[in-house]
Amino acid sequence: MSEAVHESHAASRLQLPPGPWTSVLDCLCARFPAIGRARWLDRFARGRVLDANGTPIAVDAPYRVGAQITYFREVVDEPQIAATESVLYADDHLVVADKPHGLPVTPAGGFVAETLLARLIHRLGNPDLVPLHRIDRATAGLVLFSANRRSRAAYHALFRERGIGKEYEALARPLPAMEFPLTRRSRLLRGEPFFRMMEGEGEPNSETRVAVIERSERLWRYALAPLTGRKHQLRVHMAALGAPIVNDRCYPVLCDARPDDGERPLQLLAKSLAFVDPLEGRPRRFESLLKLDVPDIEGRVF
């Protein structure tokens, strides 16, 4: 291929489903039509499609239901992201990274190598790294990774059982008519287009505690504590309160500009993570070193 190609450091796996195909190639072309047959042929030629034992598969390999194959996602002419991440902590079980605005956590869309996961795998030399949670590409701040398969389930349980205390910071317009702290509860549903969320009728499935850290005439700095982890929860809740987060291109209305505009980053920061370590039984707390980059709030009231 003449274009620059970046590939994922973490392989994707597929168990071949029932279907009418006679070859593995035909199945992949049908299952992933956006990739195109020519690109799959190129991947086979370069040995980038493997069987369960890690052996490259021939381009005419016969199709067999249930067989497991491994392949590497690739993106042609992947955009470069100048912002860099920081590793705040690393041991045999955990890695805590500080993610800049605009960097995806995992491969998606047009990004594979330019993701926090791929960068950390390369930087730390650990292909077993797995993010224990996600934050939006547009959001900056802390992301916790499992570094060891043997202890991964214990840390996953913390998130599943809500044993992780998360706090975010956000800059948004003042809400002087409201009393803080307050709790926003609502039912979040998928909206239009598909990547947006919306509040709807029904039993609440999302909950956020909102407090004020700093006040000024123009902007307030809010502390947001999500008690649930719905997609875009903080952004939807702040917009619903009447204070959409500064530079939010999705809420309350979708703007023409890209939702992850690098020149005007979303002013939302995953500030801290706190939990009792399931392996050691001791409290742990991590705080982001990043700052929201709108000019300092003046005329502060505490």
Image: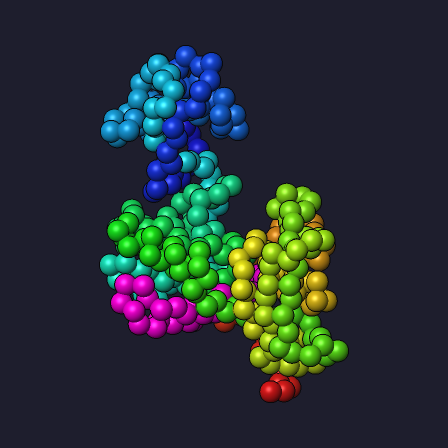
Q: Taking 174 as reference, is 124 above or below it?
A: above
User: Looking at the image, what colour scheme do you see?
Assistant: rainbow
Residue 192 as seen in the image, left or right of residue 95:
right
Q: How far across and how far down the image is residue 275, in percent?
A: 39, 68
Residue nearest the viewer, comparing 118 with 176? 176
Q: Taking 18 as reference, is 107 above or below it?
A: below
Look at 34% across and 27% down and name the residue there. 68
Look at 59% across and 66% down and name the residue there. 208
Q: How far across and how far down the image is residue 59, in percent?
A: 35, 17
Q: How far across and how far down the image is residue 174, in percent?
A: 69, 75
Q: In which quarter of the image is residue 147?
A: bottom left
Furthest toward the right, the residue is 177
Magenta residues, as a range? 263-290
Q: Is residue 37 magenta?
A: no
The image quadrant where one finds the C terminus is bottom right
Residue 246 as seen in the image, left or right of residue 85:
right
Residue nearest the viewer, comparing 70 with 46? 70
Q: Taking 91 as reference, is 256 above or below it?
A: above
Q: How far across and how far down the image is residue 228, in percent?
A: 54, 60
Q: In which quarter of the image is residue 299?
A: bottom right
Look at 34% across and 73% down and name the residue there. 283
Is residue 267 visible to the viewer in this orientation of the structure?
Answer: no
